């Protein structure tokens, strides 16, 4: 049955109203898109500036091999120094050094080993190499304002704890809350035949929030290479992490990092073997360093 004139008129009116409403909503949609707030994350340093980070790493490893249980604990506290010898827009060069340490470790059934560089004149054998590096350049590092490595000079090694390096890599453009970015990396392990295998991973970052000028960024290591060998997994547990970064948007630097591990591996050294790894890593910018940076920025604005 066809429609009469009244029905046709009603349909025509309905379609016109719908079209008109859609036209009215177009500017609103565009306005909403333009209203999405973005945040620029970039490093800001000055030549001659020196900043310090207080670093703490605590770990407990429980292993079981051939019905024998072993527990090992360690704790390290240190002060890491970055001294900037060159700083231009988009280009920063600094010397990284270790200022002081307070180290401790103990394996079950063995005596504990301690070393505090401020109170102990002679380090134990386990910490001699660390003692020799104190207040000596670990490396001279050049980065851009996104944290991408341009050049690294020196043989000093820093532990790879899942962040992909000592400098967090930031996105090149302003981003909204919820934006994700990735940094690829390759980890090397040895299989049961002592052959080196390369494992592809990536660091997933996400801007979780921005409050009072501080950005909170989550970070997680994701393994891209399939692994079906517990022996390889046991070598990766200390390098696959998840945690959080606090970045000061005004001062242009990381003010805090935190990493956590809670990993278990079964069968890495025989069917009855197991490993449980619990750890936490924190790195905090020394408070007066943050205040100095913020005051300097405020003075430059007031000028």
Image (cartoon, grey):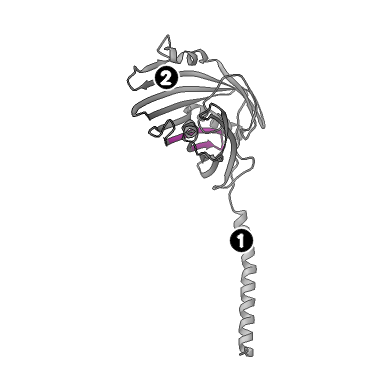
Q: Position of residue 95 (x, y in %)?
A: 59, 21
Q: Nearer the viewer, residue 23 or 302?
A: 23
From where the camera sits, is residue 44 visible? yes
Find residue 128 and report its horizontal and vertical position in percent: 47, 13
**Where does residue 23 sit, x and y in percent of width and height?**
65, 68
Sequence-first tag of 2 and 1: 1
Q: Residue sitting at 63 percent across and 59 percent down?
A: 30
Q: Which residues are magenta?
A: 244-261
Does the magenta stretch mainly form a helix, a strand or a loop?
strand
Element type where label 1 sits in the image: helix
Q: Which residue is mark 2?
A: 102
Give the CA separation, mark 2 to mark 1. 57 Å
Q: Can you identify the residue that label 1 sits on?
A: 29
Q: Front-most of 200 and 228? A: 228
Q: Residues within 10 Å of mark 1 (few under 14, many from 20)?
A: few
Q: Is residue 216 visible?
A: no
User: Relative to 43, is 36 above or below?
Assistant: below
On the rendered image, what quadrant is the N terminus found in?
Answer: bottom right
Instruction: Say which quarter of the image contains residue 251.
Output: top right
């Amino acid at each position: 049955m066809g429609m009469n004139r009244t029905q046709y008129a009603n349909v025509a009116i309905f379609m016109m109203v719908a079209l008109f409403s859609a036209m009215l909503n177009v500017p609103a949609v565009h306005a909403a898109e333009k209203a999405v707030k973005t945040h620029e994350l970039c490093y800001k340093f000055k030549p001659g500036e020196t900043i310090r980070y207080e670093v703490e790493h605590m770990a407990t490893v429980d292993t079981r091999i051939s019905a024998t249980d072993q527990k090992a604990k360690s704790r390290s506290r240190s002060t890491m120094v970055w001294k900037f010898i060159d700083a231009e827009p988009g280009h920063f060069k600094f010397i990284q050094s270790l200022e002081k340490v307070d180290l401790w470790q103990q394996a079950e059934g063995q005596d504990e080993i301690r070393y505090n560089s401020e109170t102990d004149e002679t380090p134990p054998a386990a910490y001699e190499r660390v003692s020799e590096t104190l207040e000596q350049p670990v490396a001279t590092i050049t980065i851009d304002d996104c944290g991408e490595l341009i050049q690294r000079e020196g043989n000093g090694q820093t532990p790879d704890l899942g962040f992909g390096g000592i400098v967090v890599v930031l996105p090149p453009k302003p981003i909204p809350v919820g934006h994700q970015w990735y940094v690829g990396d390759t980890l090397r392990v040895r299989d049961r035949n002592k052959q080196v295998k390369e494992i592809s991973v990536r660091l997933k970052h996400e801007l979780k929030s921005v409050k009072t000028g501080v950005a909170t960024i989550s970070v997680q290591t994701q393994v891209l290479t399939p692994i079906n060998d517990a022996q390889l997994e046991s070598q990766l547990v200390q390098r696959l992490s998840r945690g959080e970064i606090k970045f000061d948007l005004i001062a242009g630097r990381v003010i805090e990092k935190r990493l956590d591990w809670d990993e278990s591996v079964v069968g890495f050294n025989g069917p009855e073997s197991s490993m449980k790894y619990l750890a936490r890593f924190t790195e905090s910018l020394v408070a007066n360093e943050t205040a100095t940076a913020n005051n300097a920025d405020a003075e430059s604005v007031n000028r």
